[in-house]
Image (tube, helix red, strand yellow):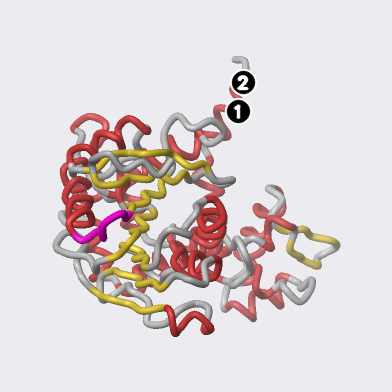
Amino acid sequence: MENSGDLESMLMGYRVSAALSVAAELGLSDELATGPRTVAELATAVGADEETLARLVRVLVTVGVYADNDGAVSNTPLGEGLRSGVPGTQRPLARTLQDPALWAAWGHLGHSVRTGETAFEALHGVDVWTYRQRQPEHNAIFNDNMTARSWKIAGAVAAAYDFSGFHTVVDVGGGQGIVLDAVLRSNDHLTGTVFDREHVVATEPETAALAPRWSAAAGDFFAEVPPADVYLLKSILHDWPDDRCVEILRVCAESLNPGGAILVIEAVLGQPGHEADAAFSDLNMLVLPGGRERTEDQYAALFAAAGLQLTRLVDTPTRMSILEAVKAGPLDRA
């Protein structure tokens, strides 16, 4: 059968994901950061069985994550991507796969497709947010992943959008405030607040010099948000079904200062160049939180239902776009 090898690779892709996740959890790439080491040395350093670690390393050598030169194991450029604390690190993402509840939810995808229900909640009897709150170890890894994935996007958002007409900004559901940090660094005239649940919100800015212009507030964005000239909602609406998105947008609209804007930062379906990323993210939303990725028209409909109007879509060099919305009326900032 033509292309059967490609199909088999797709089907067996979960094995690579599992191997990468274990390597990330053990911190193999961190141990190799200073240079090549033998498997015996790695096993001692990470507390693993030498023989079985050798089997794992052998697999990861075959897919180009590590190199093996006569028993000396070293990072490749891919392996460097699993190191802690480096720009663009994928280690937190790989570590999220250590959570058996996540694996089980993806195994329940068929239930979602047949019924439209969220796989995670149908399987585990609780939504993914409540689960993470009850599992502080997995919640911490999830937060680390959100922080790591936000770095590149944050800089792109700060560079792509003109914030000169605003004075105050709130990063709604901003977690560790990576997007807010980037926006404040690029706009000396702005003051900002990161707003999220108490168990995830940052306590200080990533950049210490921003402290005089930076604050944090804890709360529920379904109930209220601090007043601001501009709201940043990065990867928030895709977590929720339409009715809940409208609730969030209405709360923001009610607190938005005159002349302000709401910036929804999401992977928009149909945007050229990132079709696969958006499509897989859409399935992930179905499986885990119960949300979805949307087209530009679908976002426009959400805005309209919340008394807002979509004024423009701003592309960034990343997979994310900025959808600008203002209170419905004659205002046009294009």
Secondary structure under tag 1 reads: helix
Which residue occupies the foreground of this view, 113 or 269? 269
User: Relative to 311, is 169 above or below?
Assistant: below
**Residue 316: within the magenta?**
no
Residue 89, x across and y down, in percent: 59, 63
The relative height of residue 43 versus residue 249 in the rendered view (above or below) is: below
Residue 259 counted in the magenta span = yes
Span highlighted in magenta in the image: 255-260
**At 37% from the left edge and 77% from the top edge, which residue is drawn?**
202
Q: Position of residue 102 (x, y in %)?
A: 34, 54
Does residue 35 appear in this view? yes
Q: Amino acid at mark 1?
A: Asp
Q: Is residue 159 above or below residue 218?
A: above
Residue for badge 1 = 6
- Say the numbered circle drawn on residue 201: none
Res 72 quadrant in image: bottom right
Residue sitting at x 25%, y 58%: 256
The N terminus lies in quadrant: top right
Task: From the viewer's side, name the closer residue of 177 and 4.
Answer: 177
Is 327 positioned to the left or the right of 94 in the image?
Answer: left
Residue at 34% from the left image edge and 36% from the top image edge: 294
User: Picture coordinates of residue 317 (x, y %)?
Assistant: 59, 45
Circle 1 crowding by C-alpha within 10 Å: few under 14, some 14–19, many from 20: few
Q: How many marks?
A: 2
Query: Could you tell whether 303 is left or right of 163 in the image?
Result: left
In this view of the protein, can residue 94 be seen by the observer? no
Q: Label 2: how many residues lie within 10 Å, few (<14), some (14-19) or many (20+)?
A: few
Q: Which residue is mark 2?
A: 3
